[in-house]
Image (spheres, rainbow, N blue to C red):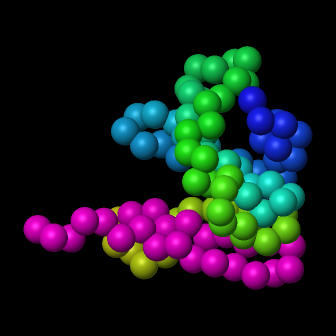
Amino acid sequence: MDENVTSFGYSAPFLLDSASTTQMIVGSHRGQLFYFNNIDDNLNGTFNLVDSVFTGFRKFGTFAAPAAADINNDGYLDVIIGNIAGDFTLHGNIPNRSK
């Protein structure tokens, strides 16, 4: 596993139950977010890094700390990411509304 993931986790992990499978998002001191699966019944703590987009082009500020809640009361979780400078970004979950 990538050293940046194992050595530099910062924030409290956010656990998400999606389709009866637990997933986890955790922030790093470098401003990256890491998204993992293979959480359920995994006592040895070897989780799978799901998507490299979370660790690539986007930085969210030093000591990124994600949280999720349904901010706009539409039934979908939105992600809020804070950092040590006190900045926050809101990433709204916009479902497919073409129907």
Report if residue 77 lies within the magenta region: yes
Residue nearest the viewer, comparing 88 with 29: 29
Residue 55 in percent (x, y) is at 68, 53
Q: Which SS does the magenta portion mostly show?
A: loop
Task: Please state the total of marks drawn on the protein image.
Answer: 0
Residue under the point 72% across and 24% down? 45
Q: Is residue 39 above or below residue 24?
A: above
**Left or right: where 86 falls relative to 81:** right
Residue 54, quarter of picture: bottom right
Return the x and y of residue 82 as percentages of the image width and height: 73, 72
Q: Tell me the quadrant of the picture where the C terminus can be found.
A: bottom left
- Can residue 41 be spotted in the picture? yes
Q: Is residue 70 visible?
A: no
* Vertical placement of residue 55 versus 75, above or below: above
Image location (x, y in percent) of residue 61: 79, 71
Q: Residue at x 66, y 66 (%)?
A: 58
Give percent across and percent down for residue 87.
76, 81
Q: Residue at x 86, y 80 (%)?
A: 85
Residue 49 to residue 57: above or below: above
Question: Which residue is outermost to the left?
Answer: 99
Q: Which residue is rendered at x = 69% and y = 79% of the image?
A: 88
Magenta residues (range): 76-99
In magenta stretch: residue 70: no
- Which sits in the foreground, 37 or 76? 37
Tell which residue pokes out farthest to the front in this image.
57
Q: Quadrant of residue 96?
A: bottom left
Query: Which quadrant would the N terminus be assigned to in this image?
Result: top right
